[in-house]
Amino acid sequence: MDSNVSELVERLGSEEDAVRKMAVFKLQSSIGDPSFADVFIAEDGLTRLRYLTLHATGNTLAYSLTSFARLLEVDKGWECVDHELVERVVELIVTHPLVNILRGAMSILVSIVSHPSSVGRLSQNAVWGFRALKPAIAIYPQFLEMLVNRLSSADHALCANALQLINSLMRDSITNDSDHEWPKFIQKLQDLGVIKAVYSLMQGTALQDHAHPLIEFQSLTKILLRKWRDTALDLENPEHRRALKGIHLASSQEKGNETGADMRRSKKHSPEKWRRLGFESESPVAQFEDMGFLGMMDLADYVRNHQDEFQKMLLEQSTKPARQRCPIARASLSVTSILYDHFEVDKCETEDSKTYLILESRSNLDKLFKPLLLHWTRLHVAGLHSFFRLWKSTSAELEDYDKIVELVRILIESVVGGAARTKDVQDVEEDLMEFEYSRLRDLQMELLELTYEDAWGQHLRQVREELQHEAAQFVKEQRIRCLLQGAWFPNENISELEGESGSPKWRYVQLSHNRRILHFGDFESMEMNRLDLDVLPGKSEVPLQPAIFELLAN
């Protein structure tokens, strides 16, 4: 093998482009073998491969990039990864149109960004993580925009590579960047349209081609939501303080006309400054204990994007008694909590990956992917509007708050949970608004019945069977004792069945003392006294039923 590798390395340095192209083409299929890679590096092939990566063009460049990417995948060749190489690869992604070149370039960056930093044998020039790309991105600031645009590529492999690189950048930023930096990076990606692009991929027909990076992006979305939820609201944090202040300012009809002194004076003369917005007390921070900064973000987004509606609701609520006012802030936090539970945000990301390994068919993949999760903010607003609608239509009061929350939970479980993967978020929003209250109540009763069935079904069935048996025994015993004492019965139905007219109106029936013969007779009138068996002309033998004797013995 050594001689073959030596020959291949020699041809990589040939002055003829055709020879280099053929050599690096063959290298693609072999470099993924760690033992081959070791010999290749020992023969100084890495230096020549790096040179081709930096200076080659056309297919030679494409094959070189693919070979280098596969070398990094087997954890070899890191000594040649430096800022010059990273800048070259970033430049190719920004400026080069050929798909086969872009695929290899993105694969290299994925390995660099995802590479663990605690590797002792790397040279001082070796770089890894998102920070390795930042100098090159500063030179080519359109890099992220081009990367997001590649998500719309018709080439499925390129699209998957682009999303994989975005995932690597997101994960590294969330893990290693400061709490001040990573939210800005996530926001920049969102501003570039990454949510819309990934949402389209999740709803597309090429789901299986993009499955792995889509699962990872969905898991990263959950990680972000969980990270925001676990971030406690802190008024010492300028961002948190600005968000809370923005909610209060948006509640004022006068926009931006208050001075600092006016605001301090307003605070003194507004004993219900926060309760008026739907908080339970004048210390709103405590209200965010469960949902953390995620709850603040959702409420702030609603207030900012629906400020006129927010102010109108506050004005309407101010004319009602306190017990009838809809607590807007509490409702927003409850909807956030409902969505958090519905999408199982606390579910470990490895569980999604394990599920994917099990679910291979197209129909099962439809159940795994949750495109609506990406439109969290829109679902929150739609859920909040449904809360307001239910509060108003049911004339709810504060003591009914938990009941409305439960109705909204059932509504979201039904509409959002029942939505197909390909259903557009706008249709889901409309379904939430148009869902009839009567249907919602029916669903609630069905769920309640199922809940009791799950918890008490076996015990209830056992009790029901026992009661039915006891009731049947009681009726039997009652009828037999009635016959032993003798009883009068109307004769109309009997006459009709026998086809007779003018028959006596009453029939007297009595069971004999030995319980084996039923005596009866027809009479024109009903007598108050008990009749003797001798005056009853009719006789009918009773079958010997053990149950009868058992009952009578008891």
Image: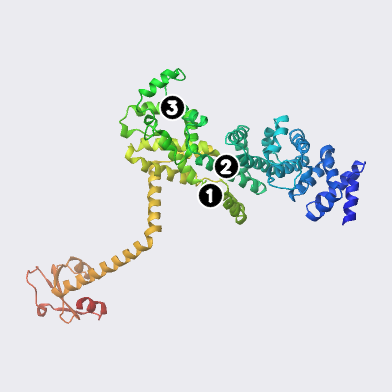
Q: Earlier in the sequence, mark 3 or mark 2?
A: 2
Dot 3: element: helix
Q: Residues within 10 Å of mark 2 (few under 14, many from 20)?
A: some
Q: Nearer the viewer, residue 95 or 70?
A: 70
Residue 51, located in which quarter of the rendered image?
Answer: top right
**Quadrant that contains the N terminus:** bottom right
Look at mark 1 in the image and give the residue it sits on.
Answer: 347
- Per the model, the C-alpha gap separating discs 3 and 1 is 34 Å
Q: Earlier in the sequence, mark 1 or mark 2?
A: 2
- Per the model, the C-alpha gap separating discs 3 and 2 is 29 Å
Instruction: State whether residue 490 is above or below residue 355.
Output: below
The answer to whether residue 232 is seen in the rendering is yes
- Seen in the image, is 548 located left or right of residue 331? left
> Horizontal and vertical percent for residue 144?
68, 34
Q: Amino acid at mark 2?
A: Thr
Dot 1: element: loop
- Per the model, the C-alpha gap separating discs 1 and 2 is 12 Å
Look at mark 2 in the image and give the residue it sits on.
Answer: 221
Residue at the spot x=54%, y=46% of the render?
420
The answer to whether residue 503 is seen in the rendering is no
> Horizontal and vertical percent for residue 63?
81, 44
Look at mark 3 in the image and give the residue it sits on.
Answer: 248
The mark tally for this picture is: 3
- Seen in the image, is 224 located left or right of residue 77? left
Q: Nearer the viewer, residue 115 or 226?
A: 115
Residue 505, located in which quarter of the rendered image?
Answer: bottom left
- Label 2 near label 3: C-beta < 8 Å? no
Dot 2: element: helix
Q: Amino acid at mark 1?
A: Lys
> Horizontal and vertical percent for residue 385?
44, 35
Q: Which mark is residue 87?
A: none
Q: Residues within 10 Å of mark 3 (few under 14, many from 20)?
A: some
